[in-house]
Image: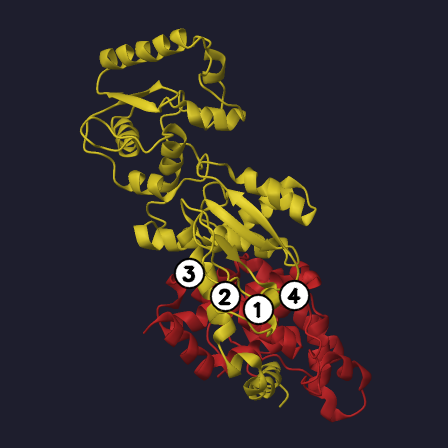
Amino acid sequence: MSWSAILDELVRTRGPALFGYAYVLTGSRADAEDLLHDALVRTFRRGRQARDLNSAHSYVKKAITTAFIDGHRRASVRPRRSDADIHDLPSTAITARDDHSAAASGMADLQAALLDLPRRERACVVLRHLEDWPVARIAAELGIAEGSVKRYISDGLARLRTTRPDLNPIPDDGPETVSLVTRSGGTR
Amino acid sequence: MNTLHDELAALRDTAAAGFSATNLAHSTGPVRRRVRRDRAVTASVGAFAVIALGAGTAYGVSLGTPDAGLAPAGTPSTSPTPEQTDFVGTYAQVTMVAGGTTDLVAEQLAEVFGVTVSDARRALDDMVTRDTAGLVTDSEGWIAPGTYSISTHGSLEEAADLLTAGRWPQFAELGIDETNIETLTIASLIEAEVRTDGVTADGTSYRAMVSAVITNRLAADMLLELDSPLFYALDTGGPFTSDDQRSIDSPYNTYLNRVLPPTPIGNPSVEAIEAALNPADTDALYFVLLNPDTGEMAFASNFEEHLANVEKLQAWYAENGADQP
């Protein structure tokens, strides 16, 4: 398959999940699309990473994550799309912060709390608890020491709990950070 | 739905359902165009090419002409000038000449982005560190020679990304990877030592000959005794090095260290990289520039021959009134 065929197939079949992942990190659809767009360019322009659908997929995910973590300086000089927020979900950060009343806003509260986390903490929490990556893999893919990954996850979860004390990170593991981060399997 | 995983998954899936409304879901055209442009950097090696990084293309602004960013090497473009409406902002040209050091582009980047040269250099180093997963942490050698058009409205990181992207397709084509990455260092030495496309009497290129001398000396556990890495370390020019200079304590001093310098000493052309990969079949262990005007070189496989060649160079300097070594 040519690189452009792999690109189209990737966007068609994995686009929604990758976009959703980028959205969880950024909290904005426009930012998520930019992030995914840049990650696709990064992945396909060097050939090597885009040999097949699966390797391209994992490289795109990695590129999204590293660009997100490194992106704070870049973000300030980016041209913004004027209609950036038109299609945003009702549960974006702004909306969520204004709505603390109903139980139904729990997810919005979670998102708001997530978006308050520093980027590295946010990325580590999402990779560990949404993507079910083991700590060792997060450390390897992001080029951070395992100890730092554990600290980011534990600090991030502690902060999330101040907003959502009811939140149980992983049902079969208790609240102990140590047991959370040493699990090697996933919850799926 | 009260676990973190479930709630994050719900968040992701809600957003994922909206993917079909994005520009990206509608067309991968803008991604393809940016990929083609970045890949086209390969074409710039040893020639003059302009790679346009259109900041606007990343944000759903449509392109007037597909692949408008690539201008043919060194000649006026005969194709219609593309409409520039697809680009946001203005462009600055950054040039790397074959054999130039990375600081050459760092200085240009510093001017464009209003940062210090060391900040610009760090951005380039960081990009190479990221792309090689830490195997290489120095961007010396990693800028493919050519002229790059960078958007002044983009970020320094984007410019650094563009400038360091051109090596990858070259490496893929030539077969350079983490197992033989020192090829780039050898190529940078060849680039610094050979100034012409000259060939020996039997038609072997000077570059391949110098490559063979380097390979043969390393294999024989000899000192490389090259001036070019020393000039790099001292940030000076030639043509000769003094005894004082040859005794400095530096990993780039190949008069004292029996190994290659720790990094490339400049950004080699693809011709030099090819020569580094394919040394000539010769037992030569010495080379000298015979005529600095024409770039004529002489090679020798023993010290006596080499001394005779050095005398010829000294004779040239005597005749041409330049300082004696």
Q: Which residue is mark 1?
A: B57
Mark 3: few, some, or many residues within 10 Å (few <14, many ≥20)? some
Tag in front: 1 or 4: 1
Q: Chain of mark 3?
A: A
Q: Position of residue A18 (x, y in %)?
A: 52, 77
The answer to whether residue A137 shows anywhere in this view is: no
- State whether discs 3 and 1 lie on one chain: no
Q: Chain of mark 1?
A: B
Q: Who is closer to the viewer here, B12 or B93?
A: B93
Mark 1: few, some, or many residues within 10 Å (few <14, many ≥20)? some
**Residue A107 drawn above or below residue B79:** below
Residue at 70 percent across and 80 percent down: it is A85
Mark 4: few, some, or many residues within 10 Å (few <14, many ≥20)? many
Q: Earlier in the sequence, mark 4 or mark 3?
A: 3
Callout 3, which amino acid? Answer: Arg
SS for callout 2: helix
Q: Which residue is mark 4?
A: A119
Q: Who is closer to the viewer here, B92 or B237?
A: B92
Q: Which residue is mark 2?
A: B34
Q: Which chain is yellow?
A: B
Callout 4, which amino acid? Answer: Arg
Q: Which residue is mark 3?
A: A46
Tag in front: 4 or 3: 3
Mark 2: few, some, or many residues within 10 Å (few <14, many ≥20)? many
- Residue A127's image quarter? bottom right
| CB within 8 Å, label 1 to label 2 | yes
Callout 2, which amino acid? Answer: Arg
Q: Who is closer to the viewer here, B251 or B1?
A: B251
Q: Position of residue B81 (x, y in %)?
A: 52, 62
3D distance between C-alphas at marks 3 and 2: 12 Å
- Residue A68's image quarter? bottom right
